[in-house]
Image (spheres, coloured by chain):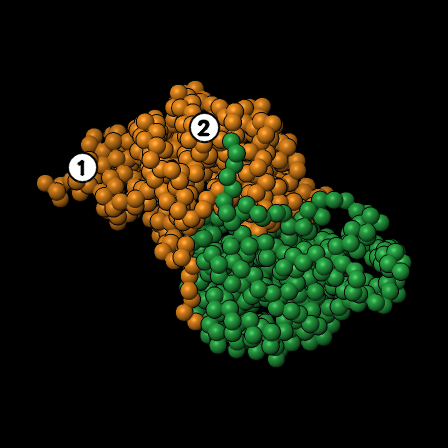
Chain colours: A green, B orange
Amino acid sequence: MAIQISDRMRDMTPSAIREILKTNTPISFSAGNPSPETFPAKELGLLAAEIFEKEFATALQYGLTEGYGPLRELTKSRMRDKYGIGGEDDELIIVSGGAQGIDLAAKCLLNEGDVVICENPSYVGALLDYRSHRARLVGVDMDAHGMDMEALARVLQVEKRAKVIYTIPTFQNPMGVTMPLERRKRLVELAVKYDVMILEDSPYFELRYEGAPVPCVKSLDTTGHVLFSGSFSKVVAPGLRTGYVCGPKALISKMVVAKQGQDVHTNLLSMMLIARFLERYDLDAHIARCCALYREKRDRMLKNLETHVDARVSFTRPEGGLFLWGQLPEGFTGTEFSRAAADRGVAVVPGMAFDVAENPENRGFRVNFSLPALEQIDAGTVILGETFARLANSRD
Amino acid sequence: MAIQISDRMRDMTPSAIREILKTNTPISFSAGNPSPETFPAKELGLLAAEIFEKEFATALQYGLTEGYGPLRELTKSRMRDKYGIGGEDDELIIVSGGAQGIDLAAKCLLNEGDVVICENPSYVGALLDYRSHRARLVGVDMDAHGMDMEALARVLQVEKRAKVIYTIPTFQNPMGVTMPLERRKRLVELAVKYDVMILEDSPYFELRYEGAPVPCVKSLDTTGHVLFSGSFSKVVAPGLRTGYVCGPKALISKMVVAKQGQDVHTNLLSMMLIARFLERYDLDAHIARCCALYREKRDRMLKNLETHVDARVSFTRPEGGLFLWGQLPEGFTGTEFSRAAADRGVAVVPGMAFDVAENPENRGFRVNFSLPALEQIDAGTVILGETFARLANSRD
C-alpha cells in the first residue's frame, strides 16, 4: 500500500536535535538534558519501594485525566504561594511533560491557518508541533532581553489571525536570555489589547544562577490571557515525563478532553513519585543544589568560550537555564560550524533548527552546559575554538 | 478573555465513561480497568529498586521518541514469533498507551472530512479522538461475530473518502465479541481492494478464557494495509501507560515525528520496568494467571445475569477481554436503564456512549467483569435484575 500521509504531516520531518542526539560525538553540547547528577535517584528509589508496597493498586491502575489529585494540589499551592500563578478563574492539570501542554493548547486554540507569534529563534519542538497543526508561524526578533516588544506590536497590528503568542520568557531556549519585568508587562498589555492568548513556556525558570528573579508573565495576568506551562523535567527528572499547565478554566477543560484522546492520563507512578517527593523532601533545597552544580558548569563554559574562541563569535550570558547561544560573524553559518565541530567530535545544534523560517544562513548555534562534565566543557570549548579558527582560515 | 476554542474542539465533551468514573456508586461495572489483583506489583517493585540503584541515569533522563531500545526489541520479537505480527516492511515503536497509537495514526492519516469506518458500537475514546480530528465516522453494524462484512463492503463502495477502518476484532469493546478468521480474511481483502488502512486495536487479545485463538488481522497482512495497536495496560498495568504500534515503516516514521511534538517519548521508567519484566519473568505465565482470575469472574457474571435478569434482556458471551454487552428489549433505552441502575448503586455504561451516532435510543449497555470482586458481581447482578423488573413494571 502506498501510504497517503495527511496534509498536516506530509512534509513534517524529525526534529533536527533529536536526530543529532542519535549520532554519537565524543562530546555533546547539543542535548537539552539536565545532568543525571541532579536526579534525586536515591529518594525516588525509596519512594518507589513504598509505593509498590503500599499503594500499588493506585499507582498501576487507570487514573483521572486531570492528573493525580495530591500532585495537582501540591503543584497548585506551590505555584500560587511561591510565584503568584493561578487565580480564581484558573485551573491546573498535570500533563505528560511540557511538550504535551503546548500540543494540547495548540489543538484547543488553533484552526488551520491561524497565526502563532513566537520568538525567533525558539524551541524547535514547539515550532514542529505548531507546524503539524498547520498554524502559520510568525517570528519576532530577540535581543539580549528577549522578544522585541515594538516588533511584536507591529506584528499584532497586521496579523489579524494571531491566536497565540508563544514565549519562553525566562532563560529562553535556545538563546538563554530573560525578558525583564517591564517587557513582560508590555507583553501582557499587548495580548489584552489584541485579545491574543500568551503561552508562557517556562521549564527552566527555577534554575537561576545569578541575578534577582523576575515575576512569571502569568503572575501579571488579571484577564485570563496567559496559559502557563511548567515541567518537572528540569527540576526532578525528564524521564518521568511530568509537567503541568495552569490557565483559564474554559481552556483547561477542553485540554482535558483532548488529553483523554491522546493518552488518557499521565503516568501514575511518576505522578505519585513526584507528589511524594514534594511531600517528604524539600524541592527548593533540591533546586538550590541543582543550581550550584549548573552555575559552576555555566561559569566554566562562559570562561572557556571567552578564552578559546575568537572574539568575533559572540555568546549570550544566561542567568540560568541550560543553554547559551553563539553567534558567528557574517559570512559563516551555524550549520557549517556545527558540521565542522561534529567532525572534530563536539556536537552543538545549528541555529537553523530553531529558526522560524528554517533559514540555512542562520549564524547561530546553541550550546548546552548542563549535561557535559567540567572536563568535557574544557576539552570541547578548545575544539570549538579550533573549529572556528579553521573555518576562518579557510575564508582568508 | 473570552477563550476562542478551535473548531475541532469547540463541541467536544468529555468521555461519558470517564465522567461516570468520577461519580461514586457502591458497585461499579462501568470501568475498563483490569483487576489490581493481576498487577505484578511485587515483581515491579523489585525491578524498580534495581533500576533506581543501577540504571537511574537512563531511567530518569530523556530518551528516544521511538521508545526504549530493549523494550522495542523484546516486543518486536514477541509479537513476530508468537503472533506473526510485523514483517520486513514494518516497524514497531513504543507509545504512551494504546490511545496514543490511535491518535498518532489519526494525525498522520486523516484530513478534515475524511471518513473513518468503525464498528458500531465502538471504543468511545477512539470515537472521541476521531471526532477531534474532524473525521466523519461511519458505523458498521455488528453481530455476535463482530463487524458485518457485507455491510462494510457496501460502505466502502460509497464512501470515497474512507481512509481508515477502525476495528477491535478480538473481545471487542464494548460488545465483547470476536471476529472469526473468515471475516478477518474478508476484512483484509476489502481493505486491499479499496486501498484503505485497517487499524487493528487489540488491547485485550491475549486475555482469552475459552475457545481457540484467532490469528490477528495484522498477521494476515501482506500488503501493508494493517496497523496493529497493542498495549501493556491489560496484561501488565495501565498506570504505566505503555503500548506499542506495529505497521508500515512509512506510516510509523511519521507517527514518530508526531509523537515528538506530543510527549517527546514514553515514560522511561515504565518502559524499563516492562522490559525487565519481560526479560526476568514469564509474561505468558502471568497472562495465564490473569485469565484464570477473569474466567471465574466472567463465568460468575454470565451465570448471575442469566439467573437474575429477565430473559428479554440478552447478553453477549465473550470468550475473553473485560466486557460483555447487554441488549434491552424494544421500548427501553440503555440510558434510562443505566440511570436507574446507578440510582440503586450499580454503574454500567449506557450504549449511547459507544454509539457512533450517539443515538439516545440505543438499547445497549456495557458491563465490565474484570474489576468487581465476586461478591460485588453477586450483589450487582441482583440489582440489575431488580432495576429492569421495576422499569418493565412501570411500563405495564
Left of B27 or right of it: where is B209? Answer: right
Quadrant for the C terminus of chain B in the image: top left
Query: Disc 1 sits on a residue from what chain?
Result: B
Taking the image as drawn, is residue A291 in sight? yes
Q: Amino acid at mark 2?
A: Val
- Residue drawn at x 85%, y 68% is A311
Quadrant for the N terminus of chain B in the image: bottom left
Left of A338 or right of it: where is A50? Answer: left
Left of A280 or right of it: where is A360? Answer: right
Query: Badge 1, how many Cα within 10 Å: few under 14, some, many 20+?
Result: few
SS for dot 2: helix
Mark found first going from the N terminus, 2 or 1: 2
| Horizontal and vertical percent position of residue A225 | 48, 71
Taking the image as drawn, is residue B124 in sight? no
Of residue B274 and residue B288, the one placed in the foreground of this image is B274
| Horizontal and vertical percent position of residue A251 | 44, 62
| Horizontal and vertical percent position of residue B243 | 53, 39
| Horizontal and vertical percent position of residue A339 | 78, 51
Residue A364, located in which quarter of the rendered image? bottom right
Q: Which residue is mark 2?
A: B192
Q: CA distance from mark 2 to mark 1?
A: 38 Å
Please tell me whether mark 2 or mark 1 is closer to you in this view: 2
- Residue drawn at x 38%, y 38% is B160
Residue A112 sits above or below residue B225 on the image: below
Q: Amino acid at mark 1?
A: Glu
Query: Disc 2 sits on a residue from what chain?
Result: B
Task: Identify the mark at residue B330; answer none if there is no mark.
Answer: 1
